[in-house]
């Protein structure tokens, strides 16, 4: 189906089901129950899941396939956000031109940076991308303030000269982003008993774009082009000795992944029309590296999982405070309850970064393939165990 | 003329911090071949050694002064640090005042210990893995270390003043008849870093241990074949590199109050310094550190900023990009080290 192999088709369908039914899947606990805080089915968070999913998928095209570790990818996301917000300010509140422009601008920007950075490889490439990203970040904060609005961040105002559409709505507020009239923030709520499911227009736009991006990525992975990129990763020198110039391939991969980042940035601005320089900082680039590695670099579904995983924990883990912990362990005797709470306290709430760091280190040390490899190992173990169970089962009948 | 001299001083001063961190990074890279993204965290731990010592010295007990009363009329409670009780108020006060310089002695064993544990516990297992894995695992470690520090010391910067005697300004230009007023502590920092750098170089140059280490940097396998336990010496070198980063952090605390993410702020710059100097080259790291520091402070002069706006923000990166593209080995990189 869709010109894909059977395995890839099923993967695409899994992702499609996950994203389309996310408002249900992420909202398994009824309102008001003790576990309701684990619900992630609200529009803001779901949008972030898919947007960072797109970002990580794009990063994976570069890092997963070619092995070039870029520490400056957030710059493209930031550039995408800025151009989308400018489009809202100058042209119209429709998200389509904004997203298109953000992809194009990010593509051009990554072409420039990639052309220079890809002259070196290994650690030097990482440092070069890092240097470029920090440069853009510093400039966005200081000299480029007329374009980026510096520390405050670029925002919509009431007197934006919008060519198509009004500067302000009739009741004097800033117009909202829309897709041909469909407001991005409009949400349909479905109350089913104690459950309250929210279907947000913006989320579904992002989800459809994620699906398209994922579909494109599968094609890139399976194409001769993707094969060439993998060859670059395994032995670039040998590729060069066979008389092949690998530079156009790596540059194409760099630009494609930069465009994915720009797309993510444009979507981010479409959901919430503001853009700040901190999106370009190198720690933001580090975050997408974490997502990709945690999920599984070089795999198709890994980056999406990693992005969802990190964003989920960032929002849910950080909300767990001492009161919540006490209510969990209230079944224990008092002394043990307090001991458990003190023990867990440093790892949740404000300390969730600690958990993330530890988790990330464990993944790099023991599971270089990320969550995907973990899943495969568990699957293999279950299979083996089952096979092991079957084998003795045949012997249970005593011979005598 | 005054302004130029002042900028050179500023630059040497900034550069001395860069040079110290980059020196440690290069020591690790040159000996063990590991790209250590947790080096900024070591710098930060050093700074927090100073904070810790300051807190330890300020541990006090409360006594009631019967002669004085507070504003409510109750007897006044007086806090006396233990140090003052033990050594007398004058001596004790002086010890507390000199907490930051004293922290040097306190930090050296701690940092060597931290470095030793890090190398034996984690980095040892990453020699055979690709550089990308080393970067990633040390990046994770840096996050963990900084969060641990944040858990114990909070997220706000902590003031750690220099001793009163070194807290003022000095007119450095008086000798040559010019007017260059400069903070004393920054001058101290510069000479301190020169001392440390000199110490490391002479240690490597003039001791047998240093000779073996240099031989190991050139060809690890052959030195191993000669029956020398090179791994052990490299582990010690890792500890020393950690101590250098830590000392840079200790002495930096009066210049900017330490907070938990100061390491990350310095990390990017120090990597740029190392790469500009040439991976694995110790003189290169020092030279590049001072050079980039001076360039940065010249770029922040108003005269230059008015010609090229924003240059002060990006000068280091621009230099790094130019050097990386024109001199693949950096300024003084050795042949055959990380040339790709």
Image (cartoon, coloured by chain):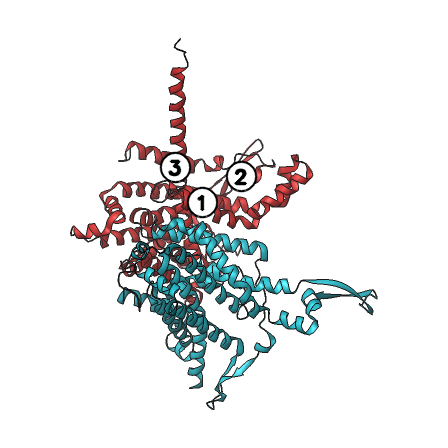
Q: Is residue A234 left or right of residue B21?
A: left
The chain holding disc 1 is A
Q: Quadrant of residue B302?
A: bottom left
State the residue position of label 1: A362
Q: Earlier in the sequence, mark 3 or mark 2?
A: 3
Q: Position of residue A146 (x, y in %)?
A: 43, 67
| Labels 3 and 1 positioned on one and the same chain | yes
Q: Position of residue B103 (x, y in %)?
A: 56, 66
Residue B76 or residue A294, whichever sits in front: B76
Rounded to the nearest whole Å, what is the CA distance between mark 3 and mark 2? Answer: 19 Å
- Which chain does cyan denote in the image? B
Mark 3 crowd level (few <14, some 14–19, many ≥20, 10 Å Cα): some
Q: Is residue A352 above or below residue B307?
A: above
- Which chain does red denote in the image? A
State the residue position of label 3: A15
State the residue position of label 2: A39
Cβ–Cβ below 8 Å for labels 3 and 2? Answer: no
Cβ–Cβ below 8 Å for labels 1 and 2? Answer: no
Residue A399 or residue A58, whichever sits in front: A399
Q: Position of residue A375 (x, y in %)?
A: 40, 35
The reply to whether residue A144 is visible in this rendering is yes
The chain holding disc 3 is A
Rounded to the nearest whole Å, what is the CA distance between mark 1 and mark 2? Answer: 26 Å
Circle 2 sits in a helix, a strand or a loop, which is it? loop
**Quadrant position of the N terminus of chain A in the picture:** top left
Q: Position of residue B20 (x, y in %)?
A: 43, 68
Circle 1 sits in a helix, a strand or a loop, which is it? helix
């Amino acid at each position: 189906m869709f010109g894909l192999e059977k395995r890839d088709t099923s993967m695409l369908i899994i992702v499609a089901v996950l994203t389309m039914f996310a408002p249900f899947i992420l909202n398994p606990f009824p309102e008001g129950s003790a576990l309701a805080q684990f619900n992630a089915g609200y529009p803001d968070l779901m949008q972030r899941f898919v947007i960072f999913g797109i970002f990580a998928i794009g990063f994976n095209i570069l890092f997963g396939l070619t092995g070039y570790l870029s520490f400056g990818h957030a710059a493209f996301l930031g550039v995408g956000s800025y151009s989308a917000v400018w489009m809202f300010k100058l042209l119209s509140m429709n998200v389509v031109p904004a997203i298109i422009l953000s992809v194009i601008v990010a593509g051009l920007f990554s072409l420039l940076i990639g052309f220079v950075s890809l002259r070196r490889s290994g650690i030097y490439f990482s440092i070069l991308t890092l240097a470029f990203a920090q440069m853009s970040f510093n400039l966005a904060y200081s000299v480029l303030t007329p374009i980026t609005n510096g520390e405050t961040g670029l925002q919509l105002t009431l007197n934006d000269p919008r060519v198509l559409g009004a500067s302000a709505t009739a009741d004097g507020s800033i117009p909202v982003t829309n897709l041909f009239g469909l407001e991005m923030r409009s949400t349909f709520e479905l109350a089913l008993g104690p459950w309250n499911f929210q279907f947000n227009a913006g989320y579904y736009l992002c989800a459809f774009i994620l699906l398209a991006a994922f579909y494109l990525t599968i094609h890139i992975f399976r194409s001769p082009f993707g094969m060439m990129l993998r060859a670059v990763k395994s032995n670039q020198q040998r590729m060069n000795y066979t008389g092949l110039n690998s530079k156009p391939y790596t540059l194409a991969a760099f630009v494609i992944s930069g465009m994915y980042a720009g797309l993510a940035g444009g979507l981010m601005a479409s959901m919430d029309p503001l853009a700040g320089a901190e999106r370009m900082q190198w720690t933001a680039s580090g975050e997408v590296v974490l997502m990709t590695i945690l999920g599984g670099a070089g795999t198709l579904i890994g980056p999406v999982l990693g992005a969802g995983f990190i964003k989920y924990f960032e929002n849910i883990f950080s909300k767990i405070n001492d009161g919540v912990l006490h209510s969990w362990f209230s079944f224990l005797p008092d002394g043990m309850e307090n001991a458990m709470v003190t023990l867990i306290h440093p790892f949740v709430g404000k300390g969730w970064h600690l958990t993330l760091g530890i988790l990330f280190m464990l993944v790099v040390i023991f599971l270089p393939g990320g969550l995907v490899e973990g899943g495969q190992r568990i699957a293999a173990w279950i299979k083996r165990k089952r096979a092991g169970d079957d084998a003795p089962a045949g012997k249970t009948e005593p011979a005598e | 003329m005054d302004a130029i001299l002042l900028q050179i001083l500023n630059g040497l001063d900034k550069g001395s911090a860069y040079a110290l961190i980059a020196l440690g990074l290069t020591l690790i890279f040159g000996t063990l071949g590991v790209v250590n993204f947790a080096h900024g965290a070591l710098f930060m731990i050093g700074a927090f050694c100073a904070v810790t010592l300051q807190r330890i010295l300020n541990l006090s007990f409360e006594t009631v002064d019967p002669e004085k009363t507070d504003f409510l009329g109750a007897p006044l409670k007086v806090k006396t640090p233990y140090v003052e009780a033990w050594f007398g108020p004058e001596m004790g006060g002086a010890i507390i005042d000199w907490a930051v310089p004293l922290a040097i002695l306190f930090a050296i064993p701690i940092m060597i210990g931290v470095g030793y544990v890090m190398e034996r516990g984690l980095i040892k297992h990453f020699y055979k893995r690709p550089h990308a894995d080393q970067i990633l695992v040390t990046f994770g470690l840096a996050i963990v270390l900084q969060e641990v520090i944040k858990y114990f010391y909070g997220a706000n910067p902590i003031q750690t003043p220099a001793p009163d005697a070194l807290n003022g300004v000095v007119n450095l230009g008086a000798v040559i008849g010019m007017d260059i007023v400069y903070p004393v502590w920054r001058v101290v920092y510069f000479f301190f870093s020169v001392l440390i750098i000199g110490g490391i170089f002479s240690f490597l140059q003039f001791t047998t241990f240093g000779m073996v280490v240099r031989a190991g940097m050139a060809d690890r396998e052959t030195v191993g074949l000669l029956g020398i336990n090179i791994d052990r010496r490299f582990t010690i070198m890792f500890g020393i590199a950690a101590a250098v980063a830590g000392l840079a952090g200790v002495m930096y605390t009066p210049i900017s109050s330490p907070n938990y993410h100061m390491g990350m702020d310095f990390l990017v710059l120090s990597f740029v310094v190392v790469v500009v100097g040439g991976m694995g080259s110790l003189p290169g790291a020092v030279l590049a550190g001072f050079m980039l520091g001076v360039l940065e402070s010249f770029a922040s002069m108003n005269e230059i900023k008015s010609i090229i706006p924003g240059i002060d923000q990006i000068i280091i990166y621009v230099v790094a990009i130019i050097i990386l593209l024109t001199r693949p080995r950096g300024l003084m990189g050795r042949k055959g080290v990380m040339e790709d």
